[in-house]
Amino acid sequence: MDSHHHDIIRLAWSRRLGLEDSALRPSHRHIEIDNNATSVTFVRLGDASALIGPENLVSASTNSWASAYTDDELSERGVLGTLGTGRSHGPVVLYFAGDIGTSIDRHDPLISHELSHVLALEATCAPDDVIAADLTRKRSWFTVLSDDEPADTAQPLATAAYLEWEGVLADVGVLTAPDARRQGNGQVVARLATNDAFDEGMIPQWRTNAENGTSRRLAARLGYEQWGVFVSVELSGT
C-alpha cells in the first residue's frame, strides 16, 4: 500500500466512527468525548489512533485513565478490559490489500453467486463462525461448490463476500465448511471477492481476531498487509 491508500483508509474509518474527516491524521491520537457512550472504543491505523468514550476515561487530561497508556499498550488484549466487567471486542487486527492478485490456485472452479448456497453453507458451520463472517449482511457472494456432482446438487464448500464501507472500503468475510477446510477453498473464494472489490474501485479490508492464526495466515497469503487494530469494551453498569 502507498500513502494514497493510507489516506483513504483513515478517511473511511473516521467516517465509520462518526468522527471528523481529519481525526485519524498521521502521528496523532484523536480523543472523542461522548459522555453518553456505553463503551470505550480504540482504533489504530498506522501511527494514527482514535479513542472514543466518556470524558473521565478518555480525555487528554493527565488524570484520565487513558493518559497512562500508549497506543501500543491500548492495542493489547486486556488493557481496555481493566475498565470493568463489560464485554470486550478485540483486539481485531485490520488488514488491507493494495494490489490485485492474479492467481486463484484452482483450475476453473465451480462458483455460485446465489444466497441459497450461502445459507446452506452457514447451516454446516458453528454459530460463532457464521457470526464472525457475517455473510448474509454482505453482498457479492462467491461460493465454491463441490465438482464431484451435478451443479444443481453440488455442495457449498466456502463463501467469501464483502460489504461496502463509506463507498471506498470493501469489508471481506470468509466462511468454510468444517469438512472442506485446509484444502484451499477459502483462499479461492477470498481471492475472487478481493479482486472483485478492486474491480469496483474499493480497497479490500480484512478483519480478524488477533488470536485467529488461520485467518491471519490466509490474509497474508492473499497479499493483505496488517495496518491497524480495533478494540472495544462495554462499560460496567450500562
Image (spheres, helix red, strand yellow):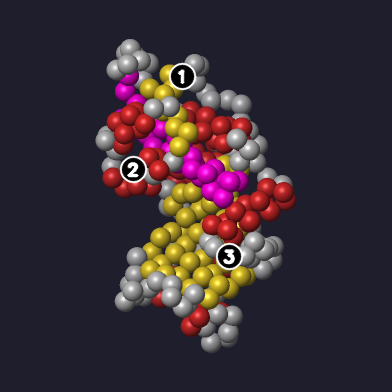
Relative to 145, say whether 207 is above or below. below
Which is nearer the N-term, disc 1 or disc 2? 1
Mark 1 — residue?
109
Q: Are marks 1 and 2 in contact (CB under 8 Å)?
A: no
Residue type at mark 1 is: Pro
Point 47% across, 55% down: residue: 92
Mark 2 — residue?
130
Q: Is residue 236 visible?
A: yes
Q: Secondary structure at mark 2?
A: helix
Point 54% across, 70% down: residue: 51
Which is nearer the N-term, disc 3 or disc 1? 3
- Residue 150: x and y, percent? 33, 12
Point 57% across, 36% down: residue: 197
Relative to 35, say whether 142 is above or below. above
Which is nearer the N-term, disc 3 or disc 2? 3
Residue type at mark 3 is: Leu
Q: Residue furthest bottom?
A: 63
Q: Which residues are magenta?
A: 154-182
Mark 3 — residue?
19
Q: Are marks 3 and 1 in contact (CB under 8 Å)?
A: no
